[in-house]
Image: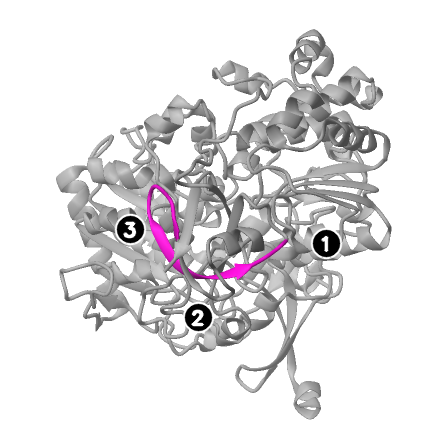
Amino acid sequence: YWDRFYKATVRHGVCGICGSACAFKAYVEGDGYLVDMKGKEGDLESQGKLCAKGNAGIWYAYDPDRLKYPLKRTNPEKGIDVDPEWVRISWDEALDLVANKFLEIKEKYGGHSIIFLGHPPYKPWLTRLAYALGSPNYISHLDTCVITNVLVRKFTMHSPTFVHDVKNARYILCFGWDQPAKGKVVYTHQYSEAVRNKAKIVVLNPLYTPTASKASRWIPIKPGTDLAFALAMMNVIINEGLYDEDYVNKYTNFPDHEDEIRSWVQQYTPEWAEDITEVPADTIRTVAREFATTKPSIALTHKRDAAGPNYANSWKLAHAIVILNALVGAIDNVGGVILPRTFKMPDVNKIYSMPPAPSVTEKADGKHMLPLLNKLGHGIFSTLIGNILEEKPYPIKAALVCNYNILSFPNPKKAIEAFKKLEFLAVVDILPSEMALLADVVLPDTTYWETSGLSLRSYNALYPQIAVKDAIIKPMYDVKSHTWIIYQIGKRVAPEYFNFSLSELSNEMVRRAGIANSVGELKSMAVNGLYTPPGACFKPLEKLKSLVSQGKKIQIYGEFFAKYGYDPLPSWEPKREEKSLEYPYYLIVTRSAVHRHGKTANIPWLHEICPENCVLIHPEEAESLGIEDLDWVYVESRYGKIKVKALRWPGIRRDCVCVSHGFGHWSRYMRVAYGWGANDGDLIPDQSIDDVLSRRDPTANALMSDVCVKVYRA
């Protein structure tokens, strides 16, 4: 090994498993055989280490199950366990088929009848292609992921940031925040450093998590009631004058609305919150005082917690957490929530003229009815499904889906019926996923090992940094990058809007960002595959002062919310579902530290560590139900049921059960993942746009944990 290691060529990579995009060094011999890989020292994200998922990610490239060339469906029947009877076709045939189908459907039904689904990084390209075809329908998954915090922070802090200077905080309050247990390297490093620095840490979570295990105090709060806890904290901090008056007056709109804010907070006493949260009033009062007087302090949320898209009141909790951080001077400050320092890299649509906006402005998912969400331009998975089936606001006839799986949708069985209804479905993917099995044409994507590029450091952007991304190995099969695929479809349907080269675009992006004259020049400026501007360092309050100078103060009182008819201050609202005699348990959905949703289930090394999900249930509840460890049980909600093994776990409230997300694959082409575990999405309902409008939620969050269940032996 060592002889091969020292003779290997070093190439610079960026992990593509999750959004952290950790930089690494790959040691390659010959034409591209990987000898080893290591996290990259100096990288703001990986900080020299990789998680289990990152270390196992090479399997993506070498997976014998991966899609190897374009495929065309020959079996018109679609559904679970239906063989597509694929045949291999050339790239030209595949791209021509997709382009011609889209043009045919545009001519027959209008371009708005085509939808385009892809992750946020795909947004510029898919929006460009959609507009070129006359469709307003780019749709992402953010309602099931992170939309509550993204939207709220965008319209209160003027930045949808998730940069948290945890390591320098002296007091850390986690509203279900559990990122170290999800294997996020950047947060694991920071949290570990805070623990070593003896920070006071308080964790609100119905589940005893690895994050809670290192905390000073674990508070097993009733699920979906964190908002009441936060409101009561504000009552104490404001009434007792514990907030940072100088910071609040300089950087927030508190002085403009002080009378209304003080009046609003009076109703939310710790005694009031005790009845709702089942946390003693004295505990709430103590935490509020400690949080306000131990500096620097930070209130943490991300997306898999109470302020994520999980409960009917989550968007209000997201706003309450912004307010708490503002009251103690934590926003853009040492040990606080940092407004990210990143290079302003223009996308393709800022460089080349966009096609005209479509004449049809109504969106397939209904987001045109939600003005703030519509401004962000993402989408609503949870309303799209019903809209397709009911042909609201108009019939959808075709879709291009890029690296999304049907298992990611709430109520996936209903989602299957919706996609079966389409006249044509094209799917870009790496693996033969469940979504790919429904496709008429499958376009195989490259892995991150096979593509080059640049990666802005964003999860820990204390100062600007770019990671250089080499193609570590040559493409294993006849596969193409999703950017190239979208570009080639675009050249066929509207060549006047795709009349540039991809290399020309990359160089222009770097030039317009003011970094270098070309990608090649930028790479020559990088050290160890990283470019950091000379003298770059974190300067507290610098970004916030700049925003304030532009009239953009932190909005404790949500003026944007008030303008569009939403609550400007986060009033109390209960979660959607409460337990009952029939459904006596609150469902908690978590994620495994060694898996990235369902994306890594086919990696055998990770499968060996965690092959399936189970349901965690308190031992006393299990005993009352006659359930032993590893017994097969049903977990059933009003909307569906799953069959999993049970694990008795004392670190959970007796009125809760917990299931991990990312399992239950039914694609037989994914031979490692097939048949293991169950999909928690079967327990979660989709929702109508009327449901969203009726609860006055500007984020349209998918309520991914706002469900009660019963558990019984199988």
Magenta-highlighted residues: 635-650
* Residue of label 2: 602
Q: Which is closer to the viewer, label 2 or label 3? A: 3
Mark pair 1, 2: CA separation? 30 Å
- How far from the left and from the top, in percent, is residue 153? 60, 32
The vertical placement of 308 against 101, above or below, is above
On the image, which quarter does residue 181 sit in?
bottom right
Residue closer to the observer: 554 or 573? 573
Mark 1 nearby-residue class (10 Å; few <14, some 14–19, many ≥20): few
Q: Quadrant of the C terminus?
A: bottom left
Mark pair 3, 1: CA separation? 37 Å
Q: Residue at x 32, y 66 (%)?
A: 667
Residue 213 badge? 1
The vertical placement of 609 against 393, above or below, is below
Compare marks 3 and 1 and give the one earlier in the sequence.
1
- Cβ atoms at labels 3 and 1 below 8 Å apart: no
Residue closer to the observer: 654 or 269? 654
Amino acid type, callout 3: Lys
Compare marks 2 and 3 and give the one earlier in the sequence.
3
Q: Is residue 85 visible?
A: yes
Q: Which is closer to the viewer, label 3 or label 1? A: 1
* Residue of label 3: 413
Is residue 435 on the magenta stretch?
Answer: no
Compare marks 1 and 2 and give the one earlier in the sequence.
1
Q: Secondary structure at mark 1?
A: helix
Q: Residue at x 27, y 62 (%)?
A: 437
- How far from the left and from the top, in percent, is residue 145? 49, 44
Q: Main secondary structure of the magenta part?
A: strand
- How far from the left and from the top, in percent, is residue 284? 73, 30
